[in-house]
Image (spheres, helix red, strand yellow):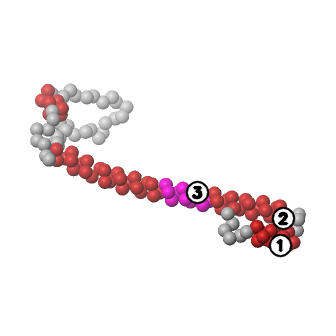
């Protein structure tokens, strides 16, 4: 815990502190040192957890970019891009209910049929 300090060295330090500070102030100094060490340990633990959290976030970002790129390429090669019949209405009032138009039979067949061409 104290590195290379042994019991004789610790007793010597305690005796010197007792002589310098006196028996009345020694408990107060001990409490102050204990609180300071506790605050220091808490600050280092917070700093360590912040660094670990940031590293974890960066790792997740790298994984997300490597996962998204191949999936987009695979989808764009194997399935044709179907343009929507109507562009979305950007001026839609959120208070009004949206209406859904039924799909024609040929459009449903296109959206549910497997791709005729398969790339290896």
The residues tagged by marks 3 and 2 sit, at their Cα atoms, a distance apart of 30 Å
| 5 up-or-down from 42: above or below | below
Q: Going from the N terminus, do you reach mark 3 or mark 2 first?
A: 2
Q: Going from the N terminus, do you reach mark 1 or mark 2 first?
A: 1
Residue at 45 percent of width and 58 percent of height: 55
Q: Disc number at residue 106?
A: none
The residues tagged by marks 3 and 1 sit, at their Cα atoms, a distance apart of 35 Å
Q: Which residue is mark 2?
A: 26
The residues tagged by marks 1 and 2 sit, at their Cα atoms, a distance apart of 11 Å
| Numbered range of the magenta stretch | 43-53
| 50 up-or-down from 103: above or below | below
Q: Nearer the viewer, mark 3 or mark 1?
A: 1
Q: Which residue is mark 1?
A: 16
Q: Which residue is mark 3?
A: 46
Whether tag 3 and tag 2 are in contact, CB under 8 A, the answer is no
Mark 2 lies on a secondary structure that is helix
Q: Is residue 21 left or right of residue 120?
A: right
| 11 up-or-down from 117: above or below | below
């Amino acid at each position: 815990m104290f590195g290379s300090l042994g019991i004789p060295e610790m007793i010597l330090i305690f005796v010197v502190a007792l002589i310098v500070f006196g028996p009345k102030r020694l408990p107060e100094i001990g409490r102050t040192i204990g609180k300071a060490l506790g605050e220091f340990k808490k600050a280092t633990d917070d700093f360590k957890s912040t660094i670990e959290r940031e590293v974890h976030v960066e790792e997740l970002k790298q994984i997300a970019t490597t996962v998204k790129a191949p999936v987009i390429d695979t989808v764009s090669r194997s399935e044709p891009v179907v343009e929507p019949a109507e562009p979305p209405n950007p001026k839609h009032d959120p208070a009004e209910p949206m209406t859904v138009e039924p799909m024609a039979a040929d459009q449903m067949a296109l959206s549910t049929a497997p791709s005729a061409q398969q790339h290896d």
